[in-house]
Image: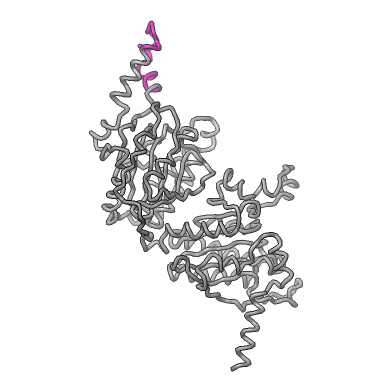
């Protein structure tokens, strides 16, 4: 037995250094952690249990016959994060450049199947060069198996992708199918075709960073949900994100009781809004004033910034927040912001996270580009997402709530459970100036002093129609509240809605307007 145990330890030691000392040193010289170091940093200390450590490829030909490194370029296993179980796979760039072959793919298949079977999140640390050319179609088939499992696991267990190197070609589609994508500034890249191919085919000259860098995907494409400055901070952020999510769709999100009193008054909100409804303010200050300890984990913080989405806690309970941002384009809804919010709402609904919307929306973005780009279809995605959501849904109207955009932003008419309004709320078909120009067109045209008449009519319209009290009288708003009471009102509403149950018609699935 002693000899056998020594042989086992020798094999595992070889597996831990599968890429070889030189390859590992070159990798570290670039300022990057090894795959094992990443996994060990991500999970709780001493909790990681590796699986399939002694796996290697069985490919024949193309120069692979004489090299059969253990792990086959991917580390898989399970551990805990804050004491909660997770499954993890981490591609090892020091072994075949992290390229995916048949055995490599099968290891990922197994850990994904285990995650779904046990109902725990699956985290992929991606740092690979795509399909392994030497293994041909077997590598492509392995990718297909990953994509299939991504789709099957969607909405069942949280799936998180962390891109820590280059991710190109078909390899990008697994992260794209997951719930959240993390990237590292200046070292993560994602693209279907690289700069050289783009230049050859289209004549466009673009750098690697411009084409598929973290900042590009955080600000322009919307592919990346989170971008962090280095590998350790990105792994820390993954841990933080998971603290807001349940392990699977059958559980409630974990409650963390803190020191922030649930009945705390938010006095600062009374004076936050500017005197004119045309002046901007920062909706994130409203959110931070209401939630526990002001902690707000914003998702897609640099993309479509006229709407803000993120996770927070109220009374220790995780909530998903969707808020118009008047500080950016007046908080108007457009194609990108509608898609961003729709995706977030559906993610919250899939994992039993209550949704709170903070509404200050003047309407949908006008313009030829928006219409040609399909704002009707894209705006309908957000409408659909709210309509199909069965989690507790609460809305707080802080100021403008105009036209169809008001309806789309989690209104009572599309199933919000409770709708509150501040006294500053303006619920109307359109803004007072536009309404007066239409309704009183003839009077204004015939007036001797048009400006004076227009000012008087606007004041009358705002006093009579652009208030929350008409909507409250009709039951479209459940209560008009003092802004200082927003936190305690939301906390009580969440307490009530904990027992909410909703039965939907039996169907295979809905047909979201993609």
Residue found at the very far left of the displayed protein:
473
Number of dots carrying numbers: 0
Position above or below: 453 against 159: above
The residue depicted at 47 percent of the width and 58 percent of the height is 240
The residue depicted at 44 percent of the width and 68 percent of the height is 83
- Residue 354: x and y in percent read 36, 52
Q: Is residue 318 left or right of residue 141?
A: left
Q: Quadrant of residue 453?
A: top left
Image colouring: one colour
Q: Main secondary structure of the magenta part?
A: helix
- Residue 405: x and y in percent read 40, 36
User: Residue 123 or 68: which is nearer the viewer?
Assistant: 123
- Residue 403: x and y in percent read 38, 32
Q: Is residue 417 visible?
A: no
Q: Is residue 431 left or right of residue 57?
A: left
- Residue 440: x and y in percent read 35, 16
Q: Quadrant of the N terminus?
A: bottom right
Residue found at the very far front of the displayed protein:
259
Q: Which residues are magenta?
A: 434-452
User: Residue 92 or 167: which is nearer the viewer?
Assistant: 92
The residue depicted at 36 percent of the width and 36 percent of the height is 398
């Amino acid at each position: 037995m002693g000899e056998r145990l020594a042989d086992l330890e020798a094999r595992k030691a070889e597996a831990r250094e599968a890429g070889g000392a030189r390859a590992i040193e070159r990798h570290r010289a670039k300022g990057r952690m090894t795959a094992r170091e990443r996994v060990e940093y991500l999970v709780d200390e001493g909790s990681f249990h590796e699986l399939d450590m002694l796996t290697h490829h069985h490919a024949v030909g193309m120069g692979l016959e004489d090299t059969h490194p253990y792990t086959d370029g991917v580390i898989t296993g399970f551990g805990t994060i804050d004491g909660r179980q997770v499954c993890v796979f981490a591609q090892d760039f020091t072994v075949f450049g992290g390229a995916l072959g048949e055995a490599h793919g099968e290891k990922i298949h197994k850990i994904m199947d285990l995650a779904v079977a046990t109902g725990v999140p699956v985290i992929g640390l991606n740092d690979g060069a795509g399909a392994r050319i030497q293994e041909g179609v077997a590598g492509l088939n392995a990718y297909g198996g990953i994509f299939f499992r991504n789709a099957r696991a969607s909405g069942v267990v949280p799936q998180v992708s962390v891109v820590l190197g280059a991710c190109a070609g078909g390899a990008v589609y697994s992260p794209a199918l997951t719930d959240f994508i993390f990237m590292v500034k200046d070292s993560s890249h994602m693209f279907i075709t690289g700069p050289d191919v783009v230049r050859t085919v289209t004549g466009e000259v673009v750098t690697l960073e411009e084409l598929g860098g973290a900042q590009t995907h955080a600000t322009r494409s919307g592919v990346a949900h989170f971008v962090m400055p280095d590998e350790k901070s990105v792994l820390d952020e993954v841990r933080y994100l998971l603290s807001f999510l349940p392990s699977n769709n059958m559980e409630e999100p974990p409650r963390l009781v803190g020191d922030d009193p649930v009945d705390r008054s938010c006095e600062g909100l009374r004076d936050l809004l500017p005197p004119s409804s045309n002046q901007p303010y920062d909706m994130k200050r409203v959110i931070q004033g209401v939630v526990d300890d002001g902690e707000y984990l914003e998702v897609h913080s640099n993309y479509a910034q006229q709407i803000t989405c993120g996770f927070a806690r109220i009374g220790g309970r995780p909530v998903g927040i969707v808020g118009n941002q008047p500080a950016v384009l007046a908080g108007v809804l457009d194609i990108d912001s509608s898609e961003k919010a729709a995706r977030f709402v559906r993610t919250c609904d899939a994992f039993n996270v209550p949704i709170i919307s903070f509404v200050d929306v003047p309407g949908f973005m006008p313009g030829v580009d928006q219409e040609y780009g399909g704002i009707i279809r894209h705006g309908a995605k957000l409408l659909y997402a709210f309509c199909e959501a069965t989690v507790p849904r609460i809305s707080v109207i802080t100021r403008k709530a105009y036209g169809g955009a008001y309806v789309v932003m989690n209104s009572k008419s599309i199933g919000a459970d409770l709708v509150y309004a501040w006294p500053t709320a303006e619920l109307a078909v359109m803004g007072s100036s536009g309404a007066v120009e239409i309704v009183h067109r003839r009077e204004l045209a015939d007036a001797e002093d048009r400006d004076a008449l227009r000012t008087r009519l606007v004041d009358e319209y705002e006093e009579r129609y652009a208030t929350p009290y008409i909507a409250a009288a009709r039951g479209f708003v459940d209560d008009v509240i003092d802004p200082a009471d927003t936190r305690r009102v939301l906390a009580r509403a969440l307490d009530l809605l904990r027992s909410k149950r909703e039965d939907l018609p039996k169907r295979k699935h809905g047909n979201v307007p993609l």
